[in-house]
Image (tube, helix red, strand yellow):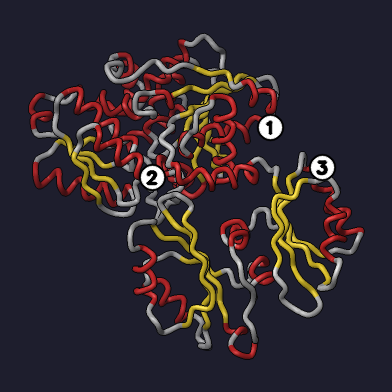
Amino acid sequence: MRLKIKKTGKFKNSKKYLKLIEEASVYDVAIDSPTTHAINLSLKEQNNIYLKREDLQPIFSFKNRGAYNKIVNLSDKQKSFGIIAASAGNHAQGVALACKRLNISCNIVMPVTAPENKLNAVKRLGAKVTLYGENLADALVKAGEISKKYKYTFVHPFDDPYTIAGQGTIGKEILEDGINYDAIFVPVGGGGLLAGISAWVRQNNKKIKIIGVEVDDSACLTEALKSNKRVLLKRVGLFADGVAVSQVGKHNLDVIKECVDEVMTVNIDEVCAAVKDIFEDTRVLSEPSGAVALAGLKLYSKRMQKKNLLALSSGANVNFQKLGFIVERSELGENREKILSIKIPEEPGSFLKLAKVFGKLSVTEFNYRKSGKRDAFVLVGIRTSSEKSFLKLKERLKKLKYKFNDYTDNDISNDHLRHMVGGRMTSPDESGHNERIFNGEFPEKPGALLGFLKNFGTKWNISLFHYRNIGSAYGNILIGIEDPNKNKSLLTKHLDKCGTPFKEESNNRAYLDFLK
């Protein structure tokens, strides 16, 4: 999704940031990060693609800039009270580093879902850590309560002029590196980075397009622009935890409306593909939020050639447990792997016949379990060199009278079916017709699965259950429930009370083909 912003041409809110950015103090803890020409990606995308390497900062993220600039500008009295902040990880490291450098005590409230590598990094920098809540919004509320009770000075992760100005020094560096950019792509969580960079670039070079990029499951800026007011998202996806923010900052939105050309969204698969791209050109493993801007750039670049495009590589604090998921989904994000459900006759030799259809195409996986006397469904992963080669495969399947469905974008297939074993309900008359299927997620923390099952209770029988942790702050659930009640809302209301958001998928084709 892309949303163009109607700018007024006036700099009522952003004008003050020129002086704040010019005077910002960041280089006691930050480097003037280099710009890397992504040669492999440039050849592939037919544009000159550059990466602003904030992943090379001392804390492997840009957050040290804004945190230090905010804290160093506090009064001596404010510093003497000690600092408190809330963060899922990178801002926490920035605050902890600043406080260590300035010899100030600090307490960081982090959600219980914060990645372990970021949690340990904050502790190593000497900060006291309080774990609370399941997301940044919960942690912010708790930090506010502690600040009020103990008189600590609160340092917001993004909604503060000095924090925005600290991040804005990146925009200053971009214009000083001597490359005539056509567009700059910036990741968006709460909007501090986008506000800072755009405030400087827009007022010093009106020709460069500035584009914010959000993950579609936490697009708080997009919703704010559509509603013309700050919107609080009911829930946000946590895979790209560095941008998992439920509401854009007020100061940030004021600047963004004046200085940014458009905002666009990307999905998780596209982010995973961008992580792979950054690695192939830099040999650095980006965290998902650090690759969001590049994911947007790649989508945008398909409409042009020979342009100079810059993306912020904003962080490299990747949780190692996520790598398997990133590798798996990067092929889907690149549109190189296709997932097909193909119906075959349940008879000897049917596998061989189907394999001959694929020819020299690379088969990435092949899943099958006998389920009936006449027909069966096979879930097949195919690596294709182009969309054209995939279309040729589909034409071959049609010509040979194979019935098939493309499940490349089917979440039930990608998140669960590919990792499951087992079959169908053994006998429909035993209650198979009463099975309903739901897809959901819950924050990944000790006891989360047990807590859900306790809340679910024993009133309904669970007929299918698949839980998968993807090395992130949440786990995916696929659950089948036998529901003999005529009033179908009873089960839905019960699930709502369990505290886990669910979406019914009883009519999902992947479920009907393989599990119903």
**Quarter assignment of residue 200:** top left
Residue on which the image places disc 2: 245
Q: Amino acid at mark 3?
A: Lys
Residue 397 location (% of width, % of height): 86, 57
| Vertical relation: 459 (above or below) 58 | below
Residue on which the image places disc 3: 388
Q: Are marks 3 and 1 in contact (CB under 8 Å)?
A: no
| Vertical relation: 419 (above or below) 314 | below
* Camera-side residue of 135 and 114: 114
Real-space Cα separation, disc 3 to disc 1, in angstroms: 17 Å
Which residue occupies 56% across, 45% down?
Answer: 267
Which residue occupies 49% across, 15% down?
Answer: 205
Residue 425 location (% of width, % of height): 62, 80
| For marks 2 and 3 on the same chain, the one whose residue lies earlier in the sequence | 2
Examine the rendering and report whether any part of residue 5 can be seen. no
Q: Left of 78 or right of it: where is 176? A: right
Give SS at disc 2.
Answer: loop
**Quarter assignment of residue 109:** top left
Residue 441 location (% of width, % of height): 45, 60
Q: Residue furthest bottom?
A: 429
Mark 3 or 1: in front is 3
| Vertical relation: 18 (above or below) 328 | above
Q: Quadrant of the C terminus?
A: bottom right
Real-space Cα separation, disc 1 to disc 2, in angstroms: 28 Å
Q: Amino acid at mark 2?
A: Val
Disc 2 crowd rating (10 Å Cα; few below 14, some 14-19, many 20+) is many
